[in-house]
Every structure is written in structure tokens, then in C-alpha cells.
Image (cartoon, helix red, strand yellow):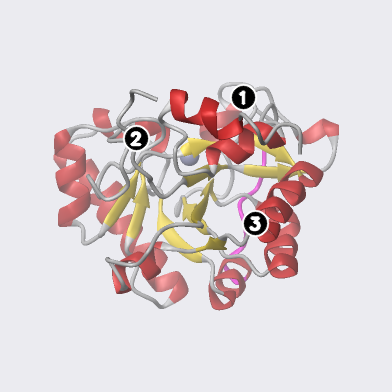
Amino acid sequence: MKENHKYSLPVLLYHRIVNEQSVRGKHKIYVWEKDFEKQLLYLKNNGYEAITFYDVERNPTMDLRNKVIITFDDGYEDNYRLLFPLLKKYNFRAVIYLVTQIGYNAWGVKEGEPRVDMMTDVQKREMCVYGVEMGGHTQTHVDLSRCTDAELVKEIGDCRADVERLVNKKVISFAYPFGGISEKVKRATKEAGYKFAVSTNTGPKEFGADNFQIRRIEVTPKTSLRSFKSKVSGYYFYPSFIKSFFTGKQTK
Ligand SMILES: [Zn+2]
């Protein structure tokens, strides 16, 4: 174990939960409902707590062990229909990043994904009241690294105002679509008033090292439960540690 490993709060990345073949889509941005339930059950049985960025903001020095942040991008209707009942069943919270000015996945349809509607405002509010954190994910799901300054203000800042109006609450976190990031984009996000911003698979390994490029760990339909365990271990970015993490646990 030569690598210098350090525990880091796992921030998981999901998009959709599905329960029928026909709606899956080719980009594999879904997880089967039954697999997702197994993942929540694993977290529950192992004493995990699913926190939100509001918790981190309120208590920046909190002990992050046995905690996880579960994030969903875009705001698909299945988040209300399939995710929400499971969150309530296992008493977990999540963070959902909303596209505020398009009612369906227009950007995905362009690339051959099935059309999926976003949640209604009423559904988003109900989830927010339950304790799901709603964050920004731009107004029209653009690659921010290609935007002008004026577009950045609209896509990042006006998006924040949209979500705040919707949930009547201060919005503090943001997700960059397509992981499109530059120093300029990060600065614009900070200036728009957010306190945290999540990327896809870029940024430092350690949670808290850069609050405007927080690395996430994607969960896909191919993620086995064994792989999920390593993803929430807090040491996922240290492959040699993960190897030893599993040795001795496999026979259980
Ligand atoms: Zn997205």
C-alpha cells in the first residue's frame, strides 16, 4: 500500500432510474430500479447517512465518514416516480440538479436518446419539502466552456434565480453540464452566488480541496454491488487501497 490514500466523501452521480427496457437509451445514463434499491439497502445496512450540500455548508468541519452525497443530474420525471419513493422508504436524501428552461432532454434527443420529460414544478417542490436539495444545472443544458460571458451569466446566474423562485430557498450548489469546465466557468459560478459546484470525473481526489470542481463517481447500469461498495468506500480514487479493501471481505 504505497499510495498515500486519504478518505474523501463520495459524491455519486446518477441521472435516471428506470424499470422497463424500452426507456433505457443508449448513453447508459440510467440505473435499474431494483439495482438502485440494492444500493440504498447496502448504504442503510452499513450505517451510511446521505447528506446534502446544505449540511456541509452548515457544518464545514463535520465528520464525513460513513456519509455520502447522492446526486441526480437534469431532473427527469422518473426521479419523482421511481427515485422519490425509494428515498422515503429508506429515509435518504439526495441532490437534484435542474435544467430550468427546457421541459425535456432536448440535448439527448439530438443524439438519439429517447425523449424524457422533466419533473413538474409541483413534483420538484414536493421533493424539496421532503429534504431533497435542488441545485442548478443551467437554463438550457449547454457546454459552459464554449459560452460567452453574457451566456454564462444567464446559464449559471439566471438558472440559480429560477431554482430559487421555484423552491423558495437559497440555492447553493451547481452541476456543470457535460463536465464542461474552465477557470472562467468556475469563477462565473462563484460570482453567481453558489457555494459548491460538481463536475463529472475531473477535479482533486479529496473532497473539500476545490469546492468549485468537486469530482463525482458515476453509477451506471454496469455497476455491480461489489463495485458500488468501492465507490462509496471513500477510497475509490486510490486503486491499490481498494484492492486491499476487498481482500478478506470477498468471502463474506
Ligand atoms: Zn446534464
Q: Which one is nearer the viewer's eye here, 175 or 55?
A: 55
First reached walking from the N terminus: tag 3 or tag 1: 1
Q: How far is mark 2 from mark 1, CA to CA?
A: 32 Å
- Residue beneath label 1, please? 27
Q: Where residue 251 appears, x then y in whole percent?
A: 76, 32
Magenta span covers which residues? Answer: 115-122
Q: What's the magenta bit mostly, secondary-structure-wise?
A: loop
Q: Which one is nearer the viewer's eye here, 164 or 50?
A: 50
Q: Where residue 111 appears, x then y in whole percent?
A: 57, 21
- Residue beneath label 2, please? 5
Q: How far is mark 3 from mark 1, CA to CA?
A: 31 Å
Q: Residue at x 55, y 36 (%)?
A: 106
Asked if disc 1 is less than 8 Å from ligand 1, the answer is no
Q: Is residue 48 left or right of residue 187?
A: right
The amino acid on which the numbered mark 3 sits, given as a three-letter code, is Asn
Q: Is residue 171 visible in this depiction of the protein?
A: yes
Q: Residue at x 47, y 34 (%)?
A: 236
Q: Where residue 10 appears, x then y in whole percent?
A: 46, 46
Q: Is residue 220 visible in this depiction of the protein?
A: no
- Residue beneath label 3, please? 46
Say whether marks 2 and 1 touch (CB < 8 Å). Answer: no
In the figure, 183 relative to 55: above or below? above
In the figure, 170 relative to 153: above or below? below
